[in-house]
Structure formats: C-alpha cells, structure tokens
Amino acid sequence: MKQRVVVIGAGPGGLAAGMLLGQTDLEVTILERQPHVGGRSASIQSDGFTFDTGPTFFLYPRVLEEIFRACGRELQREIEMTRLDPMYRVQFEGGEVVDATSCVERMQAQIAAFSPHDAANLPFYLAENRNKLERFRPVLERHFDSVRDLLAPELLRALPQLKPWSSVDRDLTRWFDDPRTRLIFSFQTKYLGMSPFRCPSLFTILAFLEYEHGVFHPTGGCGALMEKMAELVVESGVDLRLNEPVTEILFEGRRAVGVRTAERVYPADAVVINADFAHAMSSLVPNHLRRRWSDAKLAQKRYSCSTFMLYLGLDGDLDVEHHTIFLADEYRRNIAEIEGGALSAQPSFYVQNACRTDPSLAPPGCSTLYALVPVPNLSRPLDWRDAQAYRARTIARLENALGIRDLEKRIRVEKMLSPRDWEQQLGVYKGATFNLTHSMDQMLHRRPRNRFEEFDGIYLVGGGTHPGSGLPVIFESARISTRLMQQDLEFRASWEANSSPREPSGPMQGAMA
C-alpha cells in the first residue's frame, strides 16, 4: 500500500508542502476547515471587491520559484507579478515622505534631505546585510532538532553576524544617526509582529530583502497566488478537501497515526500541521499527552502583537500609494502602549490601495482600501466584543493622516477583524497575528521544530516553526519539513535532483511588487 500523509490546513505552508508531496508516490490528503484555501493569506471577496486577508505583497520570490521549479513549473508563467517602484511610501506624521525604491541613488537623494550622513552610509548598510543574508541563508534553510545542531558549520560561520545582545534599531545606529532613517529600515520588524527596539539584530535583513530583491504584487492579490498553488496541488493528484475541519489527531503511544474529522478517520503514516501552532496543540492534541508544549507552557510563551483590520470597498479613486506606512510622531510610545496592553490614541498604521496597480480588485470606478493597525494581542484585558468605537477612531485617523475626504460616506463594502475575530474566526491563538515572537529564546531549536519533537510522525510547517513568520520563510519551512519526512519515510521524490537552492538574484539595482 502507498504510504499516506495528511496535511492539516491549506495555508501557504500546507499548499507548498502539498505541491512538493504531490511529486512523490505518497497518498496525500489536505484537510482545510474553511471553504477556501490560503489561511491568513486567503482572499476576501464581496460584491466585486477583492482583498487579501493578511499579507498584501510578495517578497523574495527565490524560495517559491524553486518550489515551482521542483514541480516542473515556472512561477512567473503561472501567475503575473508586478515589481513595484516605489515599493511603498513611508510617511512620517511630521510631514516627511520617502518613496522607498531599489535605486540606490534615488533613495540616497531622499534620505539626504534630512540626513546627508545617513544617505552616504546606505551602500555600507546594503553591503553588510548582503553578506549577513549570505551567511544566514544556509541556517534558515536547514532544520534544528536539538542544541547539538547549534554546532552546525553553517551556524558557526554565521555567529559573528548574530549579535544576540543587540536589537535591530541599535544595530542600525552603526550606519544611521537619524531616528527617521532607522525607522525606514526597521519598521519591517512589524512583519514579525515585533518592535525594532526588541527584535534581534539578525532581522536588519528584512528591509535589505526588499531593497535587494524587490516587492511584488501578484495580480489578483496574494490570495490569487494561493489559489494557483491549490490548483497545482490538485493537478498533481493530491486530495484537497475544503470545509472539513480536523477535530482530533490520533495516536498510538507517542506516534501520530491519523486524524479525525466529522466525516471520517484518515489513517496516516505522517501528519503535517499547517494550522496555527498553539491553537492546533490546544485543540487537536490532548493536554496530558503534551510535555514541552502543554497548555500551561503555551500560555507562558511570548506572542506577537495582534492587528485591527479594516477592508473597505470604496466609491471612486484614492490618491494614495499602493502601499503606505504611516509612522506616528511618537512611534516608540506606540510600541510601548502595545506592549503594555493599551490602544494608542494616535497609532501608526499601514494601508494598501491595491487598485492603483491592479484595477481588477474592484468594480469600475471603485477602489479597495486595506488598513492595518497594530494592537495588543488577547493576553491583555481589552474588551473587543464591540469594536465599533475603535473602528470609528481608525476611520478618523485614516481621513486625517492621509487626507481622504468623506471616507465613511464612500464605503460600499466593509469587513472588520479585531484580535477577538482573529482568534474566533481564523483560529489564531490569542489573536497573535504573527505567531510566536522571534526572540532569541524562541528561535532555531527553541521554536517548535519542523520534525515535531513531542511526537513521532508529526511535521510542522508555517509561521509557528523554524524558520518563522513571513511568506518566504513559511515556504522554506515546507521545504525543510518535506525533506525531513523523506528521510524518515524513505520515499522517492522527483524534486530530489533539484534539492540544492539556487543563488539569489543579483545586487540592488534599478527597479523593474
């Protein structure tokens, strides 16, 4: 009989794993509780408007390109992508505006308007982070099963770049004196739900990835990319089942042997978990079976901030860039308020006006506006049962900060997600949108492991395992875990001959999102 694998969840990690496992002789089933694929990267569709639920752009395409290539496809032929220039607008409440671009000279000219010193140091920041990424890439592409793996040659070579005592902001002071410049190259820690004043210095590479490799918009949004991946999964022979939530993982001793849904039992030689890690553990695995990741220990871990979301279908066009990051005057205070469990009166926020690039996302003469405000997760005692008051504050903030007139009157379609909704509707533990934080004590072997350490036969993919959150590393987690599964189950895969990652694209040059 064929060996059987069940994947719980059709988010980015589950779909990437499904693509790779579809190139084997395994019998593979993906079970998704929602009526659609994509998880937090799914599309929201209403009355002709289309929004991305979570991620709104595609970054560092190399990993997914290699996964597509391993499946005999070319990513660029399967889905149209536009490289954005500018990548996004950084707008400070004080009035300064920087349109972030991959062109070094144009970027230097904008920074020089408030700090000639910082502008001159931009090439040095890029050069060091190019080297840092090259050193850490092998670390991010391998598994960590135990503390012994910290002695791996690739990690030892990268250690001089790690600087565990330093934060992203502090590390950036070596090149940039002006706090505004540092924010331009550090707000990206919010992709991990973390503060640049606490996030480990390793993650200065986040901004570098954008400037070196570009920010891309998939036509139709990131949800369209998920749908294309699902199409290829089904074409490969994988059984993809929607509207079928898993209610229990089945065990014989410490080995997972299948899963149960309301419809049936699925026996399995291996189970891949793509659901939110802490939510999956607390809802699918009895507490008495878990040691390292018991309910009590899960509650003690540190989790990212949450987000308050508005998805607005509007009449008319918007004079707003495709991506805008609005940074409040008191950005540090914003961060402190979130960490302390308070809602900021004047928060920083992010908005996407995707119809500026992709008119297909709205009916003719209309626009989509996606707004994200970082807020505390549900570890803090905020009452989100009625989020209308915060919605009103957010609408007023958007109008005043971006100069959008009569925003409320122009709304034709609206959806709102509060931290409570993230938890109850999307199964996100504590509403922590970006999963476990990426602090030094929750990385590498201290993060839930790709070959899950609690049980035999369970493998993890997604933001809750190594390498961490964000689409590129979630795709990498799928590649790591499927290779580990191949070692354990000893199956043949057509992608074995293409297992060595290609070199990334060349250094930062002019832009072509």
Image (spheres, grey):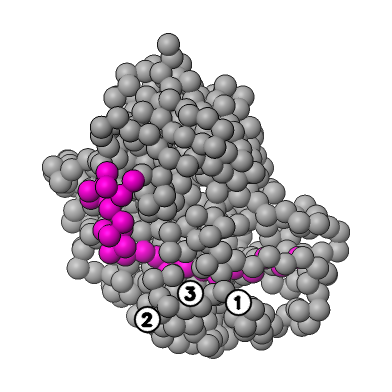
Task: Pinpoint residue 313: horizontal percent, then vertical percent.
Answer: 76, 65
| Element under disc 1 | loop
Look at mark 1 in the image and give the residue it sits on: 386
First of labels 1, 2 by sequence position: 2
Look at mark 3 in the image and give the residue it sits on: 375
| Residue 305 is one of the magenta-drawn residues | yes
Tag 1 near tag 3, CB within 8 Å: no
Q: Is residue 343 left or right of residue 81?
A: left
Q: Mark 1 and mark 2: span between their CA atoms?
A: 21 Å
From this viewpoint, is residue 244 visible?
yes
Q: Residue at x 73, y 64 (%)?
A: 368
Look at mark 2 in the image and give the residue it sits on: 340
Q: Which residues are magenta?
A: 286-313
Q: Mark 1 vs mark 2: give the one in front.
A: 1
Q: Residue at x 53, y 88 (%)?
A: 345
Could you classify mark 3 by the number of other residues whose Cα lies within 10 Å: few (under 14), some (14-19), or many (20 or more)? many
Amino acid type, residue under disc 3 in the picture: Val
| Residue 441 is one of the magenta-drawn residues | no
Q: Vertical placement of 15 versus 194: above or below? A: above
Amino acid type, residue under disc 1 in the picture: Asp
